[in-house]
Image (tube, rainbow, N blue to C red):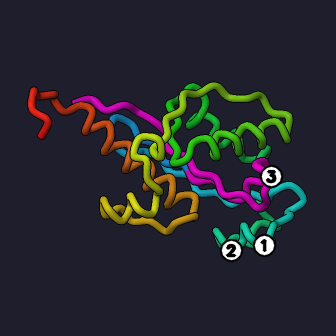
Amino acid sequence: MSLESFTAVDFETATWNPASICQVGIVRVEEGIVTETVNRLIQPPKNEYFYKNIEVHGIRPEDTQDTPLFEEVWFDFKHLIEDQVVVAHNAAFDVNCLQNAMAYYDLAQPHFEVRCTRVIYRRGLAYLSKKYKIALQHHDALSDANACAMLYLMHLKRMALPRTGSLF
């Protein structure tokens, strides 16, 4: 059985502004095997944070004050996103973050195909991770991206099963 290659991504933001990425988690899957991971703290614009965002993910201004800006790290993982199948849980949020960060730093928008595990499964990431026994430290970008990758792999395997005439 040949599985699709894809990149699972997750972004955490420092404020309500989708361009305020403070962490990126990436899991690259090639033919069903994780081949690369990226976990980067990123300094959001002006290193500004909203306290509600800190409550969600626990990342603080002091954690990112000496880290690079998005425009400085984009080219380190661009190859994992551009012209790839990109999977996220609530992809609308993550794609919006990426597009806004690209626009903020005046970078060319990458082309990619999007898949959303929230749309596929119609449930939250924490619920699904618990149900399918996937390790999750929710709102840590790499952990969320990994859980998303595992869910998408399960989906691909389920879709590859031969169809029978019976319902169950």
Mark count: 3
Q: Residues within 10 Å of mark 2 (few under 14, many from 20)?
A: few
Question: What's drawn in magenta, residue-wise?
Answer: 1-25
Q: Position of residue 109 (x, y in %)?
A: 73, 29
Distance from disc 2 to disc 3, alpha carbons, whole Å, reads 16 Å
Mark 1 / mark 3, whichever is N-terminal: 3
Residue 51: numbered disc: 1
For disc 3, the marked residue is: 17
Three-letter code for the amino acid on which mark 1 is drawn: Tyr
Res 39 → quadrant: bottom right
SS at mark 1? Answer: helix
Q: Position of residue 117 (x, y in %)?
A: 45, 44
- Check residue 18 for magenta coloring: yes
**Residue at position x 68%, y 28% in the image:** 110
Which residue is denoted by mark 2 in the rendering? 55
The answer to the question of whether label 2 and label 1 lie on touching residues, with beta carbons closer than 8 A, is: yes
